[in-house]
Each structure stands twice: as structure tokens, then as C-alpha cells.
Image (cartoon, helix red, strand yellow):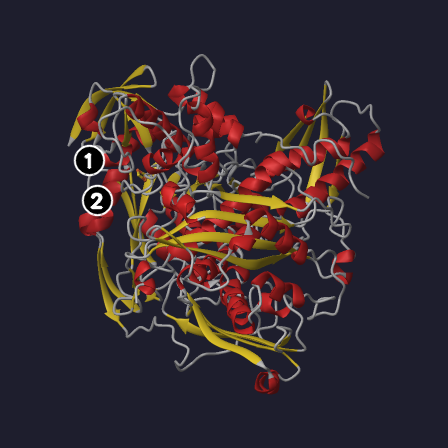
């Protein structure tokens, strides 16, 4: 069943927009709480070893300090199976920057001064933080993120490469990357025994957390397990979230640290906001990748072999295996295909999700390799991709629910002025600048995760409230869910109020995998239909009905992915190598677009992050200390205004008949996928220099 | 060491006693519960904490509150007049110049301060004529707002909002995107 068109498809302004532009929107730290205590963490200054002594005496003597908590004082957690969350449970140090203590004080200044006075002595062990493809100890994980098999092997890649008329066999690398949402990870924790927000009976320990998270429910269930509480005695509140891009998709150590610290001052809220510097060791990151891509093709460019083999790191403390090569399994038709993931477990912080895990780094390697193949075959890169369109998903053999990559490429080529691209690299010049155009394909899977429930209530006077514990991290979910509910209830947009961002609301899956609109939205559609089914169009005030997200049988029968074509123009100063990107255009096929205004922002936001990945971002690990040395915005550069000139996105008007009641496949991540490759390919077209290692910096272009 | 100071914040006198190490940002957020300015880095590197201090835009995380005794501080919240958002705030809404909204109060204060600087004729790094009045084209806007990071990547919409907001007169030249040499090329 599809929903009536009306609000869905209209460019509704953000429902929370006014609160955001005036600054009255209260993020986790901003929530007014009575009598707060300020927490300042103490971090390990070695990358591996043991804490042998801690002297908190000087710290405790600072005026206003309430407690110094280390592994000696901290309460024992009920569940330490997740080693990242086993905070202050032992003397072991697994990476530099790990929490070894926390200081609580009446003011932030006192807490910070005292944290600096905590003396920690270590028994240091040799550490290993360096990723290389030829290093010992690489292993095959049981599965990679998303539950995919680590390796696939179809046909005979080696024989096909041997026999191919044209081949590409190259190594591509991407660096350690950091999500860096603008709002640092924050948890304000308070233990009570039945306070206003916590509810419940007296004498029962209850934890309330004002948190910056992409999923209030997953934080609640995880912390309940870790602290040994029934989930209903943990409440997580997070209506406003200052970005996340995956790093707030799962609880991290600071959530547990805030909970542990707050035990020292029961009844008082403990405010813990990571600093920007601390985020580089404690808020997740994207692993560096070393990707070997092999392509074999006939002289006509038709692929006979695709191999994508990746070496990347994880933390010795906890495994996270980025699915970098998974996209190569479905992208192009080739009878012989191989993908592989090998991990090195290093003494590094715990990696986790960062926007489009897998596809974002993987499509740098794959799509630059495709550009190299086009060059080797003397084919236009758009044409090369069109020639390698698979009829069905090469991996599963399933039909596509809608694969319109070639339309995106052709539409983009026409809009972007692709015919102006110089056929011979390095031959187009404008004054001091070398001008080049590049293209890359992008894709992202359609995910819809089970576990969401929505409840619709009638408030009287024509007004409805829709409740679901979802999250809007800047995606526009608040607005989009309001639109979906209005259409499903067949009422005006203004008649619906959506409540999200609180674990007291019905369960919702995490805002991740570009799955929110499809997952939560279909639960809302089902709840609205249940409501109308029960009460018709004249409900009594107080009427309420709920529904779980319905199953999605088509997801089993079809290969469902969004696609896109990314175009970039670059200008390279011939004397200095300075790289500018005056234009980017993305053309996407993502099913139905629920809100063109917020969707465009998501697409161009992803593309902008892709530009940043292409030219600016690189985390530098000092292997002598295990420290990310460029751990702030002065050293770890992200794109700013001056870097971003004209980034635009358009999309095909369509509806995926198999993608649930909304026909929408999700848009949050695809914008970053392929964008760095499009820029790298444009740099090659401008200069003739092929850069295979991100970021692309001027020194690489000056030969 | 503690000190007693009075800040005039968004039109109200706010006396406060604080540790002399307290930044203006922390004084606003932790002592006065004025949370419209945000803390993105605490090191002057992101612009999220931008406020107008005696009419000039500043990153409030790099200023000690004690140095601001008697000063006038305007935050994004204070730009609202009689319930009406400031024209720059309206333009941000119109152009969807934000997503998560965390950098937004800082972007808006920075933009309001920047427009004043332009009006006063302050040149920037990309201003060609250092003596004449400044024409606020896209390149000028981008240059002058580059101290305000937005990880959501709302930059093009923010520039569109300010273009909208600042393009009243006909004679203002729109943009200088193509260099003369590029035109000569074709
Ligand atoms: S918080 Fe002040 S500049 Fe970042
Ligand atoms: S709107 Fe999210 S950082 Fe700018």
C-alpha cells in the first residue's frame, strides 16, 4: 500500500528550524539541570600496558573537587562483554587516550585543573599501531560490518586477468578519518530513585542520560545491560543532536564513564562533554584502508574480472571490520569477481561507523580504477560504466528493484557539460590553472531495520501526536516523519506533531545506514492506518493506536540499492599545485524523495564531506607514541566555506515500488560515496597525474 | 580566584561571580544558562561559539569572561526582536542553511557581524580594491565566513541565504566565478 501524495514530496521547511536558528534548541549539554557536577576525564598517555599507580591526592585537594574516580574506585559493571564499554574495570591500557580516570568538581575549571594533577604511573608494553599490507598477523574476520561475508570468490580472477586485453592492477589508500560532528559527544548522567524524568518507585536506582545520540533506544538497552538494570530503569533523552555521521550510532566509552562518575554524586547530574581532542581517541573513526583493485577487460572495455582486496585495521580491544570491498560485489557485471578483507588488530582506538562505512573508502579505489581502465581502453568513463551495467545483481542473481545508474550518468553528463572534458589529460588550461573534469559512480544499499514501533494519538481539535523514539541528527527526520504521518492520516501537515528523541517513546532503530525514513516511516504509516482502521475519521480525543514496522517481503526478492553519478570540476594551479573544486554535481536515484529541501541538503552535505575527504582529511598516527597527533580542527582539516563553491544535487523522479509503502530508499550516505573518486579523476584529467592515495595534496601534483 | 562581573547579555544585565579562568563561552553556557552559543572545539577553531561582543563578532571560547565586565553580548537568541527572527535567521530558514543546527547560532552571529564589517568597508583577503566600498559577492561571503565550520556541509545554502539577504540593489555585481582568462580560452 502506498500513501497518498500531499505533504510527502513537498519541500516542507524543518519543523524545528526556528529553534535551531535562534539557538533555543537544547542539545544534550544545554538541557537545564539542577545543581550540576562537571566531569573531566583523565586519559592514558601510553598506547599499551598497565596502570601501576595513580595518585589523585593533589587533584582531590583542589577546591571544588568532589571525587576522583579511577579503576580502583569505580563500581564493577554487570556486563563487560563489550570491551570498549568496560570502562575503568581494570588497570589495562589498550590504546593511547583510553579513559583511566575521571575528576568531578563543582566547576568545569576546577575539574580540568584537577584532572591535570592526577599522576598516573604505567608499566608500558611495546605497542603496534602501524598498518601495512605486508605486515605479519593479518587475519580474516568472521564477518564484516553489516553482517557480510569477508571474502567472495566467483570464477577465476587470476586466469581472467591473465587473458584480459586490458588490465588495471593498482593499490589505493585512504587514511584514518574522523567523523567530527560539530557537537562533541556529550552525556549528562544522573542517578536517582524515581525523580521527575526518571519515574518509577522510590529506592530503585535509575539512570537518566541527556545524551547526544543517533539512537536513544540503543543507548538505553546497552547501558541497562552494562549497569545491570532492567531497561525501564534507564532513560535516554536526546531531542537535538549536533550531527553524528555514525559516530553517535552506538554508545561509546564516555556514556559509561558518565554513568560511573554520576554514581559518586547520587542525585546530581554529571556533565561530561568530550573535548574535540578527546574525540579523536574515544568517539570512533574510520580505519585507514589499503586497497588492491584489479580490473580485467576486453579491448571494448567490457569487464571480465573485478577484484577488490582490502587491508585495514581494527582495535586490539574490540573488532570493527569496515566492509570496504562489499560494494564491488554488486557494482559491475564481470564473470570473475573476488573480494577480500584482511585486518590487523592494532593498539589503536576503536574504529566504528563513519558515513557510508564500506562504500565511502571502497568507491575511492574502485572508481579511480574504473577511470584508469577507461583511459587504458581509450573510452569515455561514462561510456565505460554504461558498458558494464549488470542486468541482475551479479552477487545474488536477484533482479534490481530499480537500477538507474546509466540514467544518472547520462543526465549528469548533459547537465554538467561533460563534453567539455579534454580527452587528453593535462591539456586544458585557463590562465595559471589546469582544468579537469571527473566522474565516478556511487551506490548505497537500501536498509530497513526491524524493531521500530509508532503510536498515533488524537489530541482533540483536529490534532494528532505521533510518537516514536527516533532521532533527527540533522537529516530532516522530524519534518519528514511529520509529512509521512500527515499523508497517512490524510490530514494537514500542521495537524501533526511528532515526538522523537526519548527512550520513553516507542522503540525505534538507530539513525544509521540511511534507514531512518524507510524504517520509522513505514512504522508510522502502519500506525496511522491502524488508527484510522480503529477509529475512522472522527476519533474521540485520547484515541490511540500503534503498529510495528511491517515486514518487507520484497527485500528478500530484489537487489535494492540507490545509485548516483558524481561529477567534479577541478582547477589546479600549475605553479603551486593548489587544488580548487569550483563545481560538483550529483545525480541520484534513491527512490521517492519525501522532502526535496532536506533531501538536497543531505545529498550536498554528503558530497561536501566527500570533497573534504578528497582534499583535506587525514588522521596522522605517530607510531612512536600511538597518538593521533593532529587531533583538532587546526590540524585535522575539514572543508570550510572557502573550499565549497558550487555543490549541487538533483535526482531522478521515481518511486521504488518494492521499497515499502514510501518507495524511498534512503539518502543520508550516498552523497559521500564516489565524490572523492570524482575529484581524483578530475585531478588526473586536469594534470595527467594519477593520485591513488587520499587526501590529494598539492605536493603530490608537483613533479 | 573569583571575580564579580556584569555582562549585558541579549539586552539584560547579568551579574555573575566566576572563576577568573572562565571563558566568556563557559560563563554564558555554564553560569548564565545562555546556551545559544555552542562549544565545538573550545580552541577558536570552529566558530560555533561566535557571539557579538560590543557589536563585533568574536569566538567566545577564546576570551576570558573577566575581560568582558560591562560589555554587551548578543547571541543568536538575542537577535530575535519582539518574537521576530532576524532577517539573517529568516534567510537561513528559507535556504535550509543548516542541518543539525549545532554550528548555526555561530554561523548566524558571524554572518551578522560580517555584514557590519562589509558595511564599514573592511576589506578581506579576497578584496581586490582595498580602498573602495566592498562588494559582497559569493567569494567574499565564503572567505569571510570560513572561520565557521559546518560538518553537515550546509555551506552552499548558507551562502545562498546571505546572497539573498544582501542582494537588494541592482548594481551589486553578482559573482565573479569565471576568470577573464577562462573566457579568453574559449
Ligand atoms: S568553540 Fe569557540 S571556536 Fe570552536
Ligand atoms: S548544521 Fe550541522 S554542523 Fe552545521
Q: Looking at the picture, how far across and down is residue A473, in whole percent? A: 52, 42
Q: Mark 1, residues whose alpha carbon is within 10 Å: few (<14), some, or many (≥20)?
A: some
Q: Residue furthest left?
A: B1
Query: On the rendered structure, is A165 left or right of A351?
Result: right
Q: Nearer the viewer, mark 2 or mark 1?
A: 1
| Residue A228 visible in image | no
Q: Looking at the picture, how far across and down is residue B151, in whole percent? A: 43, 44
| Ligand 2 in which quarter | top left
| Residue A311 visible in image | yes
Q: Residue at x 32, y 39 (%)?
A: B147
Front-lying residue, A590 or A660: A590
Q: Mark 2, residues whose alpha carbon is within 10 Å: few (<14), some, or many (≥20)?
A: some
Q: Which residue is mark 1?
A: B21
Chain of the residue where label 2 is placed in the rendered structure = A
Q: Where's the C terminus of chain A, which quadrant?
A: bottom left
Q: Is residue B127 above or below residue A390?
A: above
Amino acid at each position: 500500500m502506498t500513501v497518498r501524495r500531499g505533504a510527502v514530496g513537498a519541500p516542507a521547511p524543518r519543523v524545528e528550524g526556528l529553534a535551531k536558528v535562534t539557538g533555543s534548541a537544547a542539545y544534550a549539554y544545554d538541557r537545564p539541570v539542577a545543581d550540576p557536577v562537571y566531569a573531566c576525564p583523565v586519559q592514558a598517555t601510553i598506547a599499551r600496558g598497565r596502570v601501576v599507580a595513580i595518585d589523585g591526592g593533589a587533584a582531590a585537594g583542589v577546591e571544588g573537587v568532589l571525587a576522583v574516580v579511577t579503576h580502583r574506585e569505580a563500581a564493577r559493571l554487570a556486563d563487560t562483554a563489550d570491551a570498549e564499554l568496560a570502562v575503568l574495570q581494570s588497570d589495562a591500557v589498550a590504546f593511547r587516550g583510553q579513559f583511566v580516570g575521571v575528576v568531578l568538581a563543582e566547576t568545569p575549571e576546577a575539574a580540568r585543573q584537577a584532572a591535570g594533577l592526577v599522576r598516573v604511573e604505567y608499566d608500558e608494553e611495546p605497542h603496534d599501531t602501524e598498518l601495512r599490507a605486508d605486515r605479519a598477523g593479518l587475519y580474516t574476520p568472521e564477518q564484516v560490518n553489516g553482517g557480510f561475508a569477508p571474502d567472495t570468490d566467483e570464477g577465476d580472477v587470476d586466469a581472467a586477468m591473465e587473458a584480459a586485453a586490458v588490465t588495471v592492477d593498482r593499490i589505493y589508500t585512504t587514511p584514518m578519518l574522523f567523523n567530527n560532528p560539530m557537537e562533541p559527544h556529550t552525556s549528562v548522567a544522573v542517578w536517582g530513585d524515581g525523580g521527575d524524568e526518571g519515574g518509577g518507585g522510590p529506592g530503585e536506582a535509575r539512570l537518566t542520560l541527556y545524551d547526544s545520540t543517533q539512537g536513544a533506544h540503543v543507548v538505553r538497552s546497552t547501558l541497562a545491560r552494562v549497569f545491570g538494570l532492567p531497561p525501564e530503569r534507564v532513560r535516554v533523552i536526546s531531542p537535538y543532536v549536533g550531527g553524528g555521521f555514525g559516530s553517535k550510532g552506538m554508545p561509546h566509552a564516555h556514556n559509561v564513564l558518565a554513568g560511573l562518575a554520576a554514581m559518586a554524586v547520587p542525585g546530581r547530574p554529571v556533565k561530561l562533554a568530550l573535548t574535540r581532542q578527546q574525540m579523536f581517541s574515544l568517539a570512533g573513526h574510520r580505519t585507514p584502508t589499503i586497497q588492491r583493485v584489479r580490473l580485467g577487460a576486453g579491448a571494448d572495455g567490457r569487464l571480465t574480472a573485478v577484484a577488490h582486496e582490502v587491508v585495514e585495521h581494527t582495535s586490539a580491544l574490540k573488532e570493527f571490520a569496515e566492509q570496504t570491498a562489499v560494494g564491488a560485489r554488486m557494482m559491475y557485471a564481470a564473470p570473475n569477481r573476488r573480494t577480500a578483507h584482511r585486518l590487523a588488530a592494532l593498539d589503536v582506538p576503536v574504529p566504528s561507523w563513519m558515513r557510508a562505512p564500506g562504500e565511502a573508502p571502497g568507491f575511492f579505489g574502485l572508481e579511480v580504477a574504473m577511470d584508469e581502465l577507461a583511459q587504458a581502453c581509450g573510452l569515455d568513463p561514462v561510456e565505460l560504466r554504461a558498458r558494464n551495467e549488470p542486468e541482475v545483481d551479479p552477487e545474488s542473481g536477484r533482479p534490481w528493484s530499480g537500477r538507474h545508474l546509466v540514467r544518472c550518468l547520462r543526465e549528469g553528463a548533459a547537465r554538467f557539460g561533460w563534453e567539455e572534458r579534454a580527452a587528453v589529460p593535462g591539456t586544458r588550461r585557463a590562465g595559471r590553472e589546469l582544468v579537469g573534469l571527473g566522474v565516478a559512480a556511487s551506490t548505497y544499499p537500501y536498509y530497513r531495520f526491524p524493531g521500530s514501533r509508532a503510536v498515533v494519538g488524537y489530541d482533540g481539535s483536529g490534532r494528532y501526536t505521533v510518537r516514536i523514539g527516533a532521532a533527527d541528527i540533522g537529516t530532516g527526520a522530524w519534518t519528514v516523519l511529520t509529512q509521512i504521518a500527515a499523508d497517512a492520516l490524510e490530514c494537514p501537515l500542521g495537524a501533526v506533531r511528532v515526538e522523537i528523541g526519548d527512550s520513553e517513546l516507542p522503540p525505534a532503530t538507530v539513525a544509521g545506514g540511511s534507514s531512518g525514513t524507510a524504517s520509522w516511516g513505514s512504522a508510522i504509516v502502519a500506525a496511522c492506518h491502524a488508527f484510522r482502521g480503529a477509529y475512522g475519521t472522527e476519533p474521540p480525543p485520547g484515541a490511540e493506536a500503534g503498529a510495528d514496522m511491517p515486514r518487507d517481503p520484497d527485500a528478500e526478492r530484489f537487489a535494492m540499492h540507490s545509485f548516483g553519478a558524481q561529477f567534479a570540476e577541478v582547477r589546479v594551479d600549475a605553479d603551486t599545485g593548489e587544488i580548487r573544486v569550483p563545481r560538483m554535481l550529483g545525480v541520484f536515484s534513491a527512490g521517492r524523495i519525501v522532502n526535496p529541501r532536506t533531501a538536497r541538503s543531505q545529498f550536498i552535505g554528503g558530497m561536501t564531506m566527500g570533497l573534504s575527504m578528497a582534499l583535506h582529511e587525514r588522521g596522522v598516527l605517530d607510531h612512536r607514541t600511538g597518538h593521533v597527533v593532529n587531533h583538532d580542527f587546526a590540524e585535522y582539516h575539514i572543508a570550510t566555506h572557502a573550499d565549497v563553491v558550487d555543490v549541487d544535487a538533483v535526482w531522478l523522479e521515481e518511486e521504488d515500488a518494492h521499497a515499502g509503502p514510501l518507495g524511498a530508499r534512503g539518502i543520508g550516505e550516498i552523497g559521500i560515496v564516489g565524490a572523492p573518486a570524482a575529484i581524483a579523476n578530475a585531478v588526473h584529467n586536469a594534470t595527467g597525474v594519477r593520485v591513488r592515495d587520499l587526501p590529494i595534496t598539492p605536493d603530490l601534483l608537483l613533479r | 580566584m573569583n571575580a564579580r562581573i556584569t555582562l549585558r547579555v541579549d539586552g539584560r544585565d547579568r551579574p555573575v561571580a566566576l572563576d577568573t579562568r572562565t571563558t566568556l563561552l563557559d560563563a554564558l553556557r555554564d553560569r548564565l544558562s545562555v546556551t545559544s552559543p555552542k562549544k565545538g572545539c573550545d580552541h577558536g577553531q570552529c566558530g560555533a561559539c561566535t557571539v557579538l561582543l560590543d557589536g563585533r563578532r568574536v569566538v567566545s571560547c577564546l576570551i576570558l569572561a573577566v575581560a568582558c565586565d560591562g560589555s554587551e553580548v548578543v547571541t543568536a537568541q538575542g537577535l530575535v526582536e519582539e518574537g521576530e527572527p532576524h532577517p539573517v535567521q529568516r534567510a537561513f530558514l528559507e535556504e535550509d542553511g543548516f542541518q543539525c543546527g549545532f554550528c548555526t547560532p555561530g554561523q548566524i552571529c558571524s554572518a551578522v557581524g560580517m555584514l557590519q564589517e562589509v558595511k564599514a568597508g573592511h576589506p578581506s583577503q579576497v578584496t581586490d580594491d582595498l580602498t573602495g566600498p566592498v562588494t559582497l559577492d559569493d567569494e567574499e561571503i565564503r572567505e569571510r565566513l570560513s572561520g565557521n565550520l559546518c560538518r553537515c556541509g550546509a555551506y552552499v545554502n548558507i551562502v545562498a541565504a546571505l546572497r539573498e539577504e544582501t542582494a537588494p540593489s541592482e548594481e551589486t555585481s553578482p559573482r565573479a566565478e569565471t576568470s577573464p582568462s577562462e573566457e579568453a580560452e574559449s
